[in-house]
Image: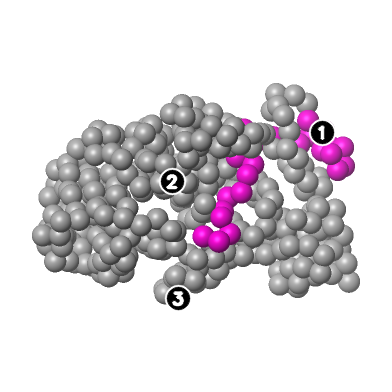
Amino acid sequence: MQKTITEGKARIKISEGKISRKLPVFYNPGMKLNRDISVLLLKSVKNTGMRIADPLAASGIRGIRMLLEMNKSKIRKVFINDASAAAADNIKKNLQLNKLSKNKKIKVANEDASVFLLKNRPFDYVDIDPFGTPVSFLDAAIKSLRNGGILAVTATDTAALAGSAPEACLRKYWAFPLRNYLMHEFGLRILIRRIQLAATASERALTPVYSYSLLHYMRVFLRVSGKKRDISKVLKQHSCVSFCSNCFSADVVADISKKNVCSACKNDKVSVAGPVWTGRLFDPKIAAAVYKNNSDDKNSSFLKTVAAESKIDCIGFYDTHVISKKLKMHPPKLETIIAELRKKHKASRTHFSGSGIRTDAKAAEMIGLLRLLKN
């Protein structure tokens, strides 16, 4: 049985039943924000006349929304593919439902995702949104992108990236994860580095312009360059990071196998993750534009937070509840802490945690401020 639903400006037919990859045509309403941000980001970049690829399209909702919601000058052609014959057939029906079946800007295919990408390249935007890890799709996706294009990647295997399954993380992402309140940010940084390493094999550099972690998935948008100096610049920003649970300091360290000591309190029992991407997670201008272009009130708070924290270039954040618990005190109000920090530093909420603050203040300053606000 099927039912018709509306998302954004699109109407599609989906399979009824419990959300599962076993459904004849998969659609997850919980990933609406994922698709919202895809559309918003493409509205926010300067690229025009784009050849867009959605190689794992399922219902086709992402590509259909792009056609209906983006300025016509932005799109040259949208390629929508799924390896399932039932899904490809349903995509065609959904195009008819949205009066797009005769639109010459659309091509629907029923092929293996990697074969589809390489056969129809080059693209200006490729969206990899699979079940689980995206690793097997990276090579074809990167090779199919032209310089200046954007690669979007989703990973739903958060158990590996966020530290619950460290051996899986090592196998798939070639890194050791972190298992504390920073685990989702570090999981995102591990994902970014893995994508970048896949790109270097094809003499490409990929730099994040927008990244986030939400619910059961991690998501990153990266701009591609073929310049050798950009490749070198990316690789120089791969390193391990140690985290001290005693004073909450984070240090960039050269080697995960060596005995590392906290630079602030000299604690020799630090947790070390990586290698990870230690550069920026966001382009502040693009993050601000994504927030500005949004018209859905349900997305506003999240996108506003990302836009605010994108202006602060640092690794990690401070979870005020975790620190306050160690100090054996009740945590002060988040906005009070941020207001005080802004007298000397950059500070904002972070989307990674409802009790987290991203700031360029040192850990000792944060602890001192919390103690001061306690009185």
Question: How many labels, in total?
Answer: 3
User: What label sits on residue 297 in the rendered view?
Assistant: 3
Which circle's residue, 3 or 2, is located before the other in the chain? 2
Which of these two is toward me, 301 or 72?
72
Is residue 129 at least partly visible in the picture? no
Q: Residue at x 64, y 34 (%)?
A: 236
Which residues make up the magenta segment?
Answer: 260-286
Disc 3 on helix, strand or loop?
Answer: helix
Where, quadrant-wise, is the C terminus in this rendering? bottom right
CB within 8 Å, label 3 to label 2: no
Residue 326 position by quadrant? bottom right
Q: Where is residue 88 in the image (x, y as percent from the top left)?
A: 16, 48
Q: Where is residue 4 in the image (x, y as percent from the top left)?
A: 19, 66
Which circle's residue, 3 or 1, is located before the other in the chain? 1
Q: Where is residue 58 in the image (x, y as percent from the top left)?
A: 25, 50
Q: Which residue is drawn at 56% across and 53% down?
A: 282
The residue that mark 1 highlights is: 261
| Relative horizontal placement of residue 307, taking residue 95 as reference (left or right) | right
User: What label sits on residue 148 in the rendered view?
Assistant: 2
Q: Using the image, determine if residue 311 lies above or below residue 8.
A: above
| Relative horizontal placement of residue 199, taking residue 252 as reference (left or right) | left
Q: What residue type is labelled 1?
A: Val
The secondary structure that most of the magenta stretch takes on is: loop
In the image, residue 280 lies in the stretch drawn in magenta: yes
Q: Residue at x 40, y 63 (%)?
A: 43
The CA distance from mark 1 to mark 2 is 41 Å
Where, quadrant-wise, is the N terminus in this rendering? bottom left
Q: What residue type is labelled 2?
A: Gly
